[in-house]
Each structure stands twice: as structure tokens, then as C-alpha cells.
Amino acid sequence: MRALARQRREGFTLLEVLIGTTISSVVLLAVAATIIGVNNVFQANTLSKQTVEGSRVGLDYVRRTVRLAGYGLDPALAFDFRTAGLPANTKDNHSVDLTTWGTFVTDDLAFRYRDPMYVRRGQLGSGGPPYTLNLAGGTTFGQPLRQGQTLLVACPGGLDFFMGQLAAGALATAGTTTLNADPLLPAGAIPECLRDANRPPFVMLVQEKRLRVEAFGGRPYLVVRHGWHADADFDPLVADVESFQVAYQMNRPPADSGCCAAQVAPDGTASTGASWLLGDESPLVHPTTGSTPPKYETPYDAAERYNGHPANIRAVHVGLTVRSTRQQPSESLDAPRRLFNAPPPPAAEDAFLRTTVETSIRVPNMTSRSFFTPEYRDPAIARDLRNVGGG
């Protein structure tokens, strides 16, 4: 009996079991909550890192490339604001609703520059269009050229030039090809110096870039197209871009301008205050070739340098929003941010993480007032042939 009583005293009462279970449950719940919290923080950091890295990659490429706009070209030919052939025929706020992803909004940024690593000599043949281009000395282009590749043919000194795209079916690697005149090139007769076999003109590549957001595999990507034509090949830069916005800072007259101090901005705003920006407000006003472009010899203080022509672009403002691939596991909410003149984002917040970046990129080549292949000689001295080739 004594042994049985001692055995009963060594067991646990129901109250003790309940207390032990409660304490164990509290400890296990605390441990589980900690693990869940740490996992949520890890997932949120992973999503944040993804969006930050995507926005950084996109912005770095845009900064590095847009800065080249207008290099080695007449500034009037550096930017393209035509809308024919673009999705919905618009360069501003093209909106696409993807079934499984959501809605993205994109502007279109198209610019070009001369390739500094490429030069040949050649001349245009008689007749045209299309115009025959023959390289000098039996040389070839040396590389396969892209479909619709733009070539610049410039006389020594750069004063007279022709720019055109490879015509359909043109040979891309032989020493001869055919070109159609560039649509932005002013109409006129072909300068005779471009047909001179004794002093062959320079033949140079023109790189054309188009930045916009496009859908692939049900996701929006910021892409760069290597050409302005619709079927130009492309490279994806950043995935899950929710908004891509572009605005253009225009040349504006200083307060002491003799011609244009009181001139109204192309979008109708007053000339005082902030810089002239086009494309950042509604109703939309973009630079337009309908204005008179400045020429190399146009004085700095002239009305042609303070209008809405693309040749007067001095900086490009870019905004980019990258969204996470999935929602956060926690209940924290993030609302989309409005960029420039993009449509107002939905009022409802969601659990996606977003990174929005903005930058202003100066385009120094657009202020050029000297030709890109200058001669070094004195025309007043007979038979002065110093560097008659230019460059």
C-alpha cells in the first residue's frame, strides 16, 4: 500500500499537465512567430533587393546611353518624335493590361548618335532614290549591318552630308549598297561633293536606340531596340517595369536675352521659374519638328534656339518604377507612385514592393556649333591642302 501511494505521488496531476502544456504551447508559438517573422523579413529584403537592383541596372544603362544622343550629328536629327508604327501610334503613356501581371504604362524614347569607332571612305553614285553607295579602294563594310541600318555620308569638313537607311534587299557586307533618304533629313538635292571620287566622303555608322516597356512572356520589360524601325532587334534590360516616363528639358533664353527674354515656353508656361520641360504634364506637349530648327551658324541668342524643335533639347528626364515579382508575405501595403504625366495609379494599395527612381541626363552633344569632320586649311591660300580630308 505504501509503495502504491508513493507511486501515485510521483505522477502528474491534471492541473500540472495543463500548466505544462500551456507553457510549452506559448514557447512553441513564440518560436514559430519568430521564425515566421524572420522569414517575412528575409522575403521582404529579397523582394526589395530585386526591385532596387532592377531600377539601378535600368537607370545606369539609360544614363550611359542617352548621354551619347546627338554625337557626331546635326542636333536636328538626334531625336525621333514620330508616332507612326508605334503601339497605339503614341510616344506617351501607352498602357497595356496584362492578364496575370497588371497594368504598365510606358513612354517612348528614341535617339541616335554616330558610332565613333567606325569610318570608311566612299561616294554616292548618280541617280536615286534609292541612292547607290560605293566604298573607295575596294574596301567593304567589314561587318554585317543591321536591317535598316542608318549610314552618314559626309563631305570633308562635314558641311554637306547625306543620311539614309539600307534599302530593302541591300547588301550589308559588300563594298556597295543602296540607301533611302532618312525621313528627318530636309529635302533637297544631293551635294556634289558626296559624288567626288578624288576626295571621297566619309561613310559612318549611326546607332539608333529606342527605349520603352514591352510585354514578353506575360511580364513587362524595359527593352532597348537597336533601330527605329518596328521590327528592329532588341535586348531586355529590366523585368517587371510598371512605369517608364520621359520628359525633355529645352533650351530657354536667359533673363538678359536680347531676342527672347519674355518668350513663352513651347507648352505655354511663363519663361520665369523652373526650366522648360516638355512631356511631364497634361495636356501633353512634345518637341516637334514643326518648329524652325537652329543651324550651326545660328547665334546663341536667336529665336530659333528657344523654340520647341528637338534640336533644342538640353537634357532628358527619366523616371522608372520597378515592381516586385510577387506580393510580400506580410500585410504591409505599398501604393504605386505617379511619375510625370502618367495616369494616376489605382487608389487601392497592394502588397507589392516598388522602387521608383528619377534622374536628369544632360546631352552635351546637342549644344554643338562645330562640324564633326572639320578641315584644317586656309581657303585663301592657293593649294593649301593641310588635312583636306577633315577629321
Image: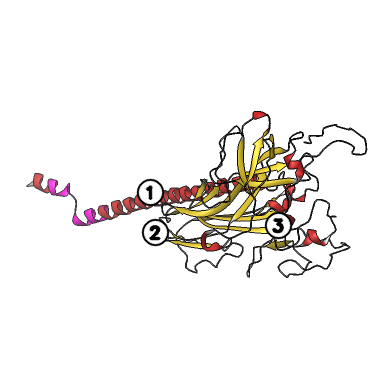
Viewer-nearest of discs 1 and 2: 2
Q: Mark 3 points at which residue?
A: 310
The front one of 34 and 59 is 59
- C-alpha separation, residue under disc 1 versus residue under disc 2: 31 Å
**Which residue is depicted at the point 53% across and 53% down?**
230
Element on which disc 2 rests: loop
Residue 389 visible from this viewpoint = yes
Residue 232 located within the stretch drawn in magenta: no
Mark number displayed over residue 100: 2
- Is 138 on the left-hand or right-hand side of 388? left
Mark 3 vs 1, N-terminal side: 1
Q: Report x, y in % for residue 189.
A: 73, 51
Residue 56 against residue 103 in the figure, above or below: above
Residue 95 against residue 23 in the figure, above or below: below
Q: Mark 1 points at which residue?
A: 35
Q: Report x, y in % for residue 195.
A: 73, 40
Which scheme is used to colour this image of the protein? secondary structure
Q: Residue furthest front?
A: 127
